[in-house]
Image: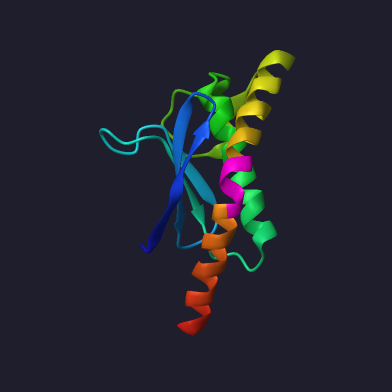
Amino acid sequence: MKQKIVGSYYFGPDQVEVVLREGIGAEYYHFPEKGKIPRIKIGADYETFEGLLEAILHETIEFAIDRYGCSFKGSRIQTTEQTQYLFVFNHTEFSEINARSAEFLSLSLSDIKKAWKKWNKKQQGNK
């Protein structure tokens, strides 16, 4: 799978690496490999930047919720079914989740947009 590291950015007390990859959607990894920082991978094959923005916003907030300890799995059964996840937080935690997400997005979005445009120019050239 084709991938491109965009960079690493502050996310509250953490640093998070951003990677563009083939496809759509996004996912995060708290411990991608031994000795590596957390990572958010974003599918780059969106027709518009708004599509990619929706994916990164979703994953950024979900990462913050999970990192802050407010994400729970509704079942002990191992599954990737998204309906099994439950988010519970109070207003103070909600404010912290938003602050961490806003910091990360303000630092990373211009680089993500540049990398996405470059990715799509290369893809257009290969057609």
Q: Which residue is farthest right?
A: 91
Q: Is residue 71 magenta?
A: no
Is residue 109 within the magenta segment? yes
Residue 93 x, y percent position in the rendering: 66, 17
Residue 59 horizontal side relative to residue 126, left or right: right
Which colour assignment does the render follow?
rainbow
Q: Position of residue 110 (x, y in %)?
A: 60, 53
Q: Nearer the viewer, residue 50 or 87?
A: 50
Residue at (38% x, 64% y) in the render: 2
Q: In this figure, what is the number of numbered marks?
A: 0
* Residue at 49% across, 76% down: 123
Task: Residue 104: tell me if it is visible.
Answer: yes
Q: Which residues are magenta?
A: 106-110
Can I make out residue 90 in this image?
A: no
In percent of width and height, residue 9 lies at 49, 39
Most common SS among magenta residues: helix
Pick out the residue farthest to the left.
Answer: 34
| Between 11 and 44, the one nearer to me in the picture | 11
**Quadrant location of the N terminus in the rendered image:** bottom left
**Residue pictured at 34% horizontal, 38% vertical:** 32
Q: Position of residue 74 (x, y in %)?
A: 55, 24
